[in-house]
Structures are given as structure tokens and as C-alpha cells.
Image (cartoon, grey):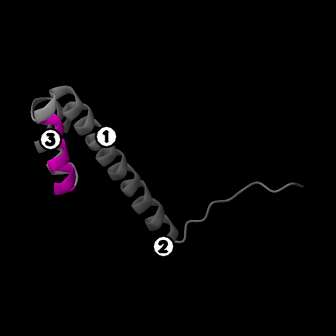
Amino acid sequence: MLSVFAIVCPPLAVLLTSSPLQAATNLGLTLFLYVPGVLHARKAVEKYSVNRQYDKLMRILDDRATAGVRATYPTAA
């Protein structure tokens, strides 16, 4: 859904995923030329989605660590 916003209305996509300053920058890029605004918005949306995936992974790893699950590694005999 955010990818669609990045193409249709780039400043809105950046505002939903990043800081208001980035949205203002994107608005300027979009008003100057449409393509730089879209490229900037796609980058912001991609960064947001990657950060969400990493946060989810780190929460899972933290839950495992607090549950006492330990990784076992083979030892040389």
C-alpha cells in the first residue's frame, strides 16, 4: 500500500514513514520534478519496511534469549 502512495502521492508516503522534515524535502522534490520525488519516496518506504522487518526479528531473538533458549554449536572432538 505504501508503494502505491509513493507513486501516486510521494509526500504522503514519506510523511507516513518518515519525519516531517523528510516529507517537506520530498514535497520540494515532487514540485520541482515528479521523478526525484517518487525516487525519494520509494527509498523512504523501503527503509521503513526493512527497519520494521529488523525490529520484528530482534524482538523474536530477544524473546528467545529471555526464555533461556541457547544456540548450540558443534564442538570439535
Read off the residue under disc 2.
66
Position of residue 62 in the picture relative to residue 41 (left or right): right
Q: Main secondary structure of the magenta part?
A: helix
- Give the residues in magenta: 19-30
Marks 3,2: beta carbons within 8 A: no
Q: Nearer the viewer, residue 47 or 36?
A: 36
Marks 2,1: beta carbons within 8 A: no
- Disc ID at residue 28: 3
Query: In which quadrant will I find the N terminus?
Result: top left
Read off the residue under disc 1.
46
- Residue 74's x, y, as percent? 76, 54
- Residue 38's x, y, as percent? 20, 31
Q: Residue at x 19, y 34 (%)?
A: 37
Of pointers 3 and 2, the one earlier in the residue sequence: 3
Height in image: 52 above or below 64?
above
Separation of marks 2 and 1 at Cα, in angstroms: 30 Å
Q: Quadrant of residue 39?
A: top left
Residue placed furthest toward the right: 77
